[in-house]
Image: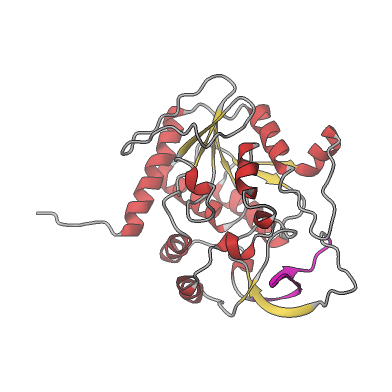
C-alpha cells in the first residue's frame, strides 16, 4: 500500500502548478508579470515545471520604472534568454512622456504609482486577459484580501468587496469584455516558504538577495542605497554597510537590511528569526498612508 504523503512544500508547489495550468486552460492571452525579484523568479520556475517539456505558454512582462536595481535587470534578461521565453518590456518613462504625467518630487521620488498607467496600457496593447503575479497574502494586509483569481473591471480597477468565492480548487475565470484577471499562484506561500523552496530547488537569484557591501544612507532607521535616483542632502552621511535585500522593488523605495547572510542556509535562518514582514521592514512606499497598498491596487496596481 502506498503511504507516501507530500511534504508542505510539495503541496504548495502542486497547488501553484495546478493554478498555472488553470490559467493556460481558461484564458486566451495570459502573461506573467516579472520583476526580477525572488517571487516572480519562483513563479517562472513553477511555470517551467507546469508545462515541461514545452516552453512556458505565455510571455514575461516587465513594467520598467527606470529606477530598478541593475542586478535585477541583468538577471531578468539572462533568465528570459536561458529559458527561451518571450520578454516584453514597457517603460514608465515612455508613459510619462506620452501622457504628460507629473512625476513625484522629493528625496525618494518613487514611480510606483505611475507604473499602474504603464501596466494598464500594456494589458490593453496586448489584450491580456490574465496577468500572473507573485503577490503573497503574508506580505501586506491589502494583499491578504485577494483571491487566487482576482477580477479587475474594464478600467483595471479592483474592488475588494466584490471578490468571487473560491471553493476547494474551483476557480472562476469568466470575465466580460474589457475585464481581466490577476492571478496569484503563490498566495498561500510565506516568505519563508519561498526561501525554503528556492533552497530545495536550487533556484538562481540576483546577488543583491545575499549580503554584499553597498554605499547607503540612513533614513528613519532604514538603509537606502546611494543611487542616481535619490537626492543626497547635506545632512546625509554616506556609509558602507554589509547589507542584503529581502524584497526587490525600485531603488527609490526599497531599503536594505544589515546582514552577513551570504548563503541560502544563512538567509533561511535569518528569515526564520525575523518577526517583521519583508514589506513592513523594507518598503518605504507602503508607509505613505495606512492604506497605501490598497489604494494602489484599487487603481490597477499589481
Residue ID at (64%, 27%): 155
**Residue lying at the far left of the rendered structure:** 1
What is the chief secondary structure element of the magenta stretch? strand
Q: Is residue 22 above or below residue 11?
A: above
Residue 137 in picture, x, y percent from top left: 48, 51
Nearer to me, 85 or 254: 254
Answer whether residue 272 is visible to the viewer in this image: yes
**Residue lying at the far front of the rendered structure:** 290
Q: Give the side of residue 143 with respect to residue 200, left or right.
A: right
Q: Is residue 218 magenta?
A: yes
Q: Give the side of residue 298 with respect to residue 90, left or right.
A: left
Residue ID at (86%, 35%): 100
Residue ID at (43%, 55%): 189
- For the N terminus, which image quadrant? bottom left
Q: Give the side of residue 287 with respect to residue 144, left or right.
A: right
Nearer to me, 88 or 165: 165
Residue 37 in picture, x, y percent from top left: 59, 56
Q: Is residue 33 above or below residue 245?
A: above
Residue ID at (60%, 65%): 281
Answer whether residue 134 is visible to the viewer in this image: no
Q: Is residue 250 above or below residue 260?
A: above
Residue 30 in picture, x, y percent from top left: 53, 33
Give the residues drawn in magenta, as a range: 212-228
Q: Quadrant of residue 72?
A: bottom right
**Residue lying at the far top of the rendered structure:** 177
Q: Is residue 296 above or below residue 164?
A: below
**Residue lying at the far right of the rendered structure:** 234
Residue 271 in picture, x, y percent from top left: 49, 70
Amino acid at each position: 500500500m502506498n503511504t507516501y504523503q507530500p511534504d508542505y512544500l510539495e503541496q504548495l508547489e502542486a497547488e501553484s502548478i495546478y493554478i498555472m495550468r488553470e490559467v493556460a486552460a481558461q484564458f486566451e492571452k495570459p502573461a506573467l508579470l516579472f520583476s526580477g525579484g525572488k517571487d516572480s523568479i519562483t513563479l517562472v520556475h513553477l511555470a517551467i515545471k507546469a508545462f515541461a517539456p514545452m516552453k512556458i505558454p505565455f510571455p514575461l512582462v516587465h513594467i520598467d520604472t527606470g529606477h530598478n536595481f541593475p542586478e535585477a535587470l541583468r538577471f531578468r534578461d539572462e533568465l528570459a534568454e536561458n529559458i527561451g521565453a518571450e520578454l516584453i518590456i514597457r517603460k514608465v518613462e515612455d508613459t510619462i512622456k506620452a501622457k504628460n504625467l507629473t512625476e513625484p518630487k522629493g528625496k525618494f521620488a518613487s514611480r510606483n504609482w505611475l507604473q499602474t498607467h504603464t501596466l494598464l496600457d500594456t494589458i490593453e496593447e496586448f489584450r491580456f486577459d490574465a496577468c500572473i503575479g507573485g503577490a503573497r497574502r503574508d506580505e501586506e494586509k491589502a494583499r491578504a484580501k485577494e483571491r487566487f483569481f482576482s477580477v479587475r473591471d474594464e478600467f483595471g480597477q479592483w474592488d475588494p468587496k466584490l471578490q468571487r468565492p473560491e471553493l476547494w480548487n474551483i476557480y472562476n475565470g469568466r470575465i466580460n469584455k474589457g475585464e481581466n484577471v490577476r492571478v496569484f499562484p503563490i498566495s498561500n506561500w510565506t516568505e519563508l516558504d519561498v526561501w525554503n523552496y528556492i533552497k530545495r530547488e536550487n533556484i538562481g537569484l540576483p546577488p543583491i538577495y545575499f549580503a554584499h557591501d553597498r554605499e547607503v544612507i540612513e533614513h528613519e532607521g532604514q538603509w537606502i542605497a546611494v543611487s542616481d535616483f535619490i537626492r543626497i542632502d547635506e545632512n546625509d552621511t554616506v556609509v558602507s554597510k554589509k547589507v542584503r535585500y529581502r524584497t526587490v522593488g525600485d531603488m527609490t523605495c526599497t531599503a536594505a537590511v544589515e546582514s552577513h547572510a551570504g548563503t541560502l542556509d544563512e538567509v533561511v535562518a535569518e528569515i526564520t528569526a525575523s518577526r517583521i514582514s519583508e514589506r513592513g521592514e523594507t518598503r518605504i512606499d507602503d508607509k505613505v498612508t495606512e492604506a497605501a497598498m490598497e489604494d494602489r491596487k484599487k487603481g490597477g496596481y499589481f
